[in-house]
Every structure is written in C-alpha cells, then in structure tokens.
Amino acid sequence: MECSRHCETFRQRLETLLHAQKIVCYLVRDAAVVSILVFLNAWFFAANAAEVKNDGTIAIIDTHTHIIRGYRRRDPSPTGAQALRAMDNYRIATAILLPPPFPANHAGIYGLREIEPIARANPDRFGFAAGGESLNAMIQQIAPDRVTPEVIRQFEKEADAIVKAGAVGFGELAAEHFSSGRGNHPYESAPPDHPLFLALADIAAQHGMPIDLHMEAIPEDMPFPRRGGLQNPQTLKENISGFERLLEHNGSAHIVWAHAGWDLTGRRTVPLMRSLLTKHPNLYMSLKLDESGFRLTSPFAVDDKIKPGWLMMLRDFPDRFVIGSDEFFDEGTERLALARKFVDALPPELARGVATENARRIYRLEARTK
C-alpha cells in the first residue's frame, strides 16, 4: 500500500509534466529534451500497464454501496477511511456511494448532504448518487393520482439539486422493497410507472444520469414468500408490466435494475431478465451476491461456479451488467468478498466489461472527473 501511494503521487506529478510537453518542446526546440520527454511518456504508460496486470486481478467499479445503514446510528464521515481499506482489500478501484431508499421522516435518514463531502475528499475512489433520501420519499408518500403540477415542480427541484451537486446517478429508489428487519427499514411499494418515476426518467435522460432502482420481481400477483421482517404484506401485486411502461416511457433514460443475483421472491429468473433485456435496450442490471437470497435464482451453482444459463445471458448482453455489491461499509465486507469471487469466476472475455468498463460508460465516470 505504501508503494501504491508513492506510485500514485509520482503518476500525478508525471502527468503534470507531460501535460506541459508541447509547451516545453515549442519553447526549447531541443531534440534532447524532446527525446527525454518521449522516453518518459513511453515509460510511464508501460509501467502503468504492468501495474494493471501485476497480480492478474481485475479492478472493480462497485456501482452500489452504502457508507452506513443509518445516520443516527453512526456519523458517516470516519467511515470513509474504513470503506477505502475494505475497497483496497478486494481491489475495488471506485465505489459509488448512495443512500438506501428511505421513506419520509425515517429514523437515520441521510443522503446528498452527508455523502457528497466523503466523495469530494476522495474523488479518485468515490462517486455518489442521491435521491434515496428525497426523491424516493416523495414517490412513497404521494399516491399516483395525487401528483399535481406543483408536486412535479418540487420533485424536479430536488432532482436538479442532485444534478448540480455532481452526482453520477439517482438512487437508490424503491418500487418494491421488502422489510428485512435490519435497520428498522420498512416495507416500501410504489408502482414502477408512478408519474414521479416517469418524470425522473425524463430528467435522467436529459442529464445522462442513470436511475438505480430496487424492485423485487413480481411477474404476477402472489402471496408474500415469507422471508424477512414482520412489516411485509400478505400478498404482492404484479409489477413487471409497470416496469416495462417505465422503460418504454423514455428510451434515452438508463434504468439500472439493482440486485440481479439476489432475489427474494424466487421470480427474478434468467428467462425473465433475458426477456426484458431483449425488449428494452435502456435496461441495465447491477449484480449483488448475498446468500440470503433464493438459491434457485443465484448465479452460483453448488460447486461455486457460475451457472451456464447466467454465463449465456452475460455473453448475450455483455454491455448491460455492472457490479453493485450493496455493501454497507459500517457492517462488514461479506458482499464485497462475494462480488470479488463473482468477477474472478467470470471468463476473461466477460470479466473486464462487467467489473469496470460498463460502469465507466453507463455512469460516465471519466467525463465527470475531468
């Protein structure tokens, strides 16, 4: 780690030097100086390439992490260093921090105000999204038939604040969120085609910012599967048709359906996901691995290899999946470890896209750091 820090410092100084290369060459017009600069330039990129391949481990951009579960439980500021240590342990190059999908006035609610300073202090390691504390609260609190022009204006104002703060996305928002009994998080449900979700799709398309959506898969009305906290309802209402209406509303809006691989209804199957990916080119999915989900729909087989159906889906849609561990950095690193295990189990031709390249493109990370 000490060596890594020195290398990073040297890299930054060298980039500054190389940035001035054209000016130096013009002023000095000295062949020897030009030769030295060209040599340094070639040496730097060769060294950088060797560092990437150093241990054969592919770096991960984790698009869905939480700095803490609840603000009143713990101040998030010191947890930034804890998160960086965990990220280094599992070769997480960058993590996008976002608040959970809080209902209005929930104990421990936090969001843009608390997360932005942590990301600003470490811009090379953290990005951030927001709206789980504000936009989600409005969606959960206001019934679809009570959305007025004034409500839309207030919602747009909240979204605009997130855009101006430099967030890379909107989230975490909930269309169907079960209560697990942890962190006193209640059951939340809103139609995926709620007018405020549709309004957000238009805003997201305008600014090139994806929407991170938490939605348990319910292809038809069904009894609750009896998993999790006591606040959950007895029955669940079908939500896939509404989800498709959201996807169709604005094809330029990138919707990232969170938690593929961690399924609490047993209905988020490979055939369902393949069908939606085929019909909706603006649909993306982030992968979460957690042993509390249904084993039947998990990507891992009993031998810890990735199931053939999952591999075939990833090969057919190689640019539509990213890693989104859903790790809470104040609670441990189990989900980071499983994300690392998943990436390491992928064939080389898939691993780099799923681990890093897709996230850079979908969240426009390079453009937002310039």
Image: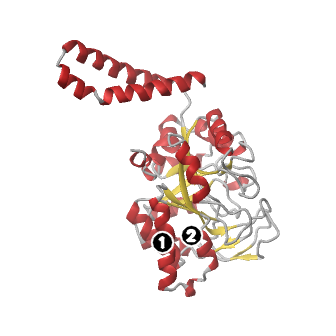
Mark 2 residue element = helix
Quickly name the residue at label 2: 135
Whether residue 17 sits left or right of residue 148 in the image: it is left
Instruction: Tell me which amino acid carries mark 1.
Output: Lys
Say what secondary structure mark 1 lies in.
Answer: helix
Question: Could you say which quadrant of the image residue 257 lies in?
Answer: bottom right
Q: Which residue is mark 1?
A: 157
Q: Is residue 320 above or below residue 46?
A: below
Which of the two residues, 324 or 239, is positioned nearer the viewer here?
324
Instruction: Where is residue 285? Give x, y as percent.
Output: 54, 56
Q: Is residue 140 above or below residue 6?
A: below
Residue appearing at x 38%, y 65% in the figure: 206
Q: Quadrant of residue 70?
A: bottom right
**Number of residues whose C-alpha sits closer than 10 Å to that of mark 2, classed few (under 14), some (14–19) or many (20 or more):** many
Residue 293 in the figure: left or right of residue 43: right
Where does residue 296 sit, x and y in percent of width and height?
A: 70, 55
